[in-house]
């Protein structure tokens, strides 16, 4: 069967336009699953790492808020009990509150500030504690430089102003009698965890205690460092998957391309990739398909070469006869002998014309089978029309000896449908009927019958001729094979009709064979050709 590479420009009649398939999970694609899995794995590592670290970050900040809240409530209770003066309008004693902040231990990474009811700072742990705030001095001032680094830039001033407003807003919300906790930016630009605890005496809010933890940046830096291993693992996974995909996909595809180029440029008859043919993925399927395709093409090329050799051999015979007749014609003076030579020339010319026509039909057969798409075909109607054409050629008053063609349909009310191409299938039965008529005796009859056998439709073409030699029942389907009975004119058959019929039937999933008809005594009384096609309705 020929390999079709051309794409039809138009859709066949009755055919539906193929739907565009949307993206679906590659269930049968091992390479597709491998590519998606490796890429998703690398992404999943990053996502899991980010989720884990986000949970860790949230947990650390929440833990720090809980710790500051507990510590602040304890300090607020101590200040309420020890630094509250005045009745019935209580107030905070700033000196006592400062002393309490000095006595209580405040870690270096934290800052405690006490505000009165008007938001004025009463105490600051950075002031009352024995602490020296230091920072690295800026580089030495260059000549002509007016900014010595001690003044804040406008951006830093705006940032400090925003920080003071955020602190004032936090204190104002705490004045409502409920603790306020969260993260904000401090005056120095660092991100801090802040908790503001109202100091209440009975129901009166006397002030606000604010605790700040300035190690949030260190926590975030530690989180980033913790994320680094996940990034490294993800990068390694991506690199390994890329290398793996290169080795598994890119390199084999390149080898297949080079092997195809070798077949095209060097004229090789086969493609050899044994290490790829053993693979069980798409590339293995592609390699095996390419090997099968080149093998099929090689067989096709061998068949074409044999066909060309057979054509040359068959054409040489009538050409040799014509050349001999032409060379002898000038030497013959007898009118009767010249007439015989002219008859031979006419017969050979007709034979050449028949050969060329049949060879042309045989060479176009593959193209016709590929261009015409199969469709539902009423085999009963087709056979009836073909037989009616032969019967129409026989008119009353025709010369005796004409061979008639009849048809018999078993169960004509039932549909006899096959999935086939009408023109080639019609050519099969015309070839069989023509072959049967050519071997039928004068006033003989060719009988065509159609029956159903399970899920098959069986067509019989029978004649009353001499039959087929038992040894040639299969040989007659070979190209240019002719078996002529005695008295049959030489060159009446090209030997391609039955070969074309078998090729068409097999292309439709059917079977064709020949057998001899016998009487009760076992004598051959004719030939029978059987065409077995699958029933499309089964």
Image: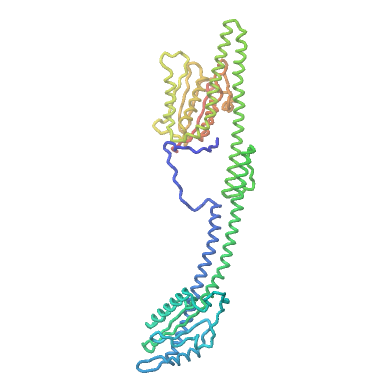
- Tell me if 158 is positioned left or right of 236 in this view: left
Residue 176, picture quadrant: bottom left
Decide: is 206 above or below 333.
Answer: below
Residue 109 image position (x, y, % from top left): 52, 81
Nearest the viewer among 232 and 130 is 130
Residue lying at 60% horizontally and 39% vertically, measured from the top left:
294
Residue lying at 46% horizontally and 85% vertically, measured from the top left:
113
Decide: is 258 above or below 189.
Answer: above
Residue 79, picture quadrant: bottom left
Residue 273, picture quadrant: top right
Decide: is 105 above or below 307.
Answer: below
**Residue 453 in sight here:** no
Q: Quadrant of the N terminus?
A: top right
Extreme residue in the left direction: 88
Residue 130 image position (x, y, % from top left): 53, 88
Residue lying at 43% horizontally and 33% vertically, measured from the top left:
377
Nearest the viewer among 138 and 374 is 138
**Residue 79 in sight here:** yes
Residue 312 image position (x, y, % from top left): 61, 24
Q: Quadrant of the C terminus?
A: top left
Residue lying at 55% horizontally and 82% vertically, measured from the top left:
134
Nearest the viewer among 270 and 205 is 205
Residue 186 image position (x, y, % from top left): 47, 78
Q: How is the image coloured?
A: rainbow
Extreme residue in the top direction: 334
Q: Report the number of discs.
A: 0
Extreme residue in the front direction: 144
């Amino acid at each position: 069967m020929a390999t079709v590479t051309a794409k039809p420009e138009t859709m066949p009649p009755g055919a539906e336009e193929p739907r565009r398939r949307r993206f679906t999970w590659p269930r049968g694609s091992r390479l597709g699953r491998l590519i998606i899995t490796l890429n998703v794995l690398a992404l999943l590592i990053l996502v899991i790492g980010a989720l884990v670290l986000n949970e860790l970050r949230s947990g650390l900040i929440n833990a720090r808020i809980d710790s500051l809240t507990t510590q602040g409530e304890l300090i607020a209770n101590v200040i309420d009990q020890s630094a509250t003066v005045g009745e019935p309008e209580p107030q905070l004693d700033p000196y006592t509150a400062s002393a309490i902040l000095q006595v209580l231990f405040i870690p270096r990474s934290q800052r405690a500030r006490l505000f009165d009811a008007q938001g004025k700072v009463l105490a600051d742990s950075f002031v009352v504690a024995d602490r020296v705030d230091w920072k690295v001095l800026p580089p030495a001032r260059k000549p002509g430089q007016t900014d010595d680094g001690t003044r804040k830039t406008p951006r830093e001033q705006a940032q400090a102003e925003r920080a003071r407003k955020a602190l004032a807003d936090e204190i104002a919300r705490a004045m409502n009698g409920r603790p306020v906790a969260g993260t904000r930016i401090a005056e120095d630009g660092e991100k801090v965890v802040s908790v503001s605890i109202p100091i209440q005496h009975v129901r009166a809010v006397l002030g606000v205690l604010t605790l700040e933890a300035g190690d949030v940046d260190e926590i975030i830096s530690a989180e980033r460092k913790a994320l680094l291993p996940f990034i490294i693992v993800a990068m390694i996974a991506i690199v390994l998957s890329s290398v793996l995909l290169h080795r598994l996909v890119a390199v084999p595809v390149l080898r297949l391309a080079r092997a195809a180029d070798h077949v095209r440029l060097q004229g090789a008859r086969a493609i050899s990739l044994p290490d790829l043919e053993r693979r069980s993925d798409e590339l293995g399927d592609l390699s095996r398909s390419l090997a099968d395709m080149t093998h099929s093409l090689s067989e096709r090329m061998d068949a074409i070469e044999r066909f060309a050799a057979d054509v040359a051999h068959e054409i040489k015979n009538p050409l040799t006869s014509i050349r001999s007749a032409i060379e002898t014609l000038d030497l013959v003076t007898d009118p009767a002998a010249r007439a015989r030579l002219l008859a031979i020339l006419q017969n050979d010319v007709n034979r050449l014309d028949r050969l060329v026509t049949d060879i042309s039909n045989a060479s176009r057969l593959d193209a016709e089978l590929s261009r015409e798409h199969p469709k539902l075909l009423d085999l009963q109607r087709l056979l009836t029309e073909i037989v009616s054409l032969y019967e129409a050629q026989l008119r009353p008053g025709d010369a005796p000896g004409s061979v008639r063609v009849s048809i018999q349909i078993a169960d004509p009310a039932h549909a006899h449908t096959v999935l086939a191409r009408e023109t080639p299938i019609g050519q099969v039965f015309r070839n069989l009927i023509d072959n049967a008529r050519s071997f039928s005796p004068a006033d003989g009859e060719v009988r065509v019958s159609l029956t159903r056998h399970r899920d098959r439709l069986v067509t019989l073409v029978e004649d009353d001729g001499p039959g087929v030699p038992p040894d040639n029942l299969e040989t007659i389907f070979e190209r240019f094979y002719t078996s002529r009975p005695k008295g049959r004119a030489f060159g009446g058959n090209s030997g391609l009709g039955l070969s074309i019929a078998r090729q068409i039937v097999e292309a439709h999933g059917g079977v064709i064979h020949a057998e001899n008809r016998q009487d009760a005594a076992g004598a051959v009384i004719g030939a029978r050709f059987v065409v077995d096609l699958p029933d499309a309705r089964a």
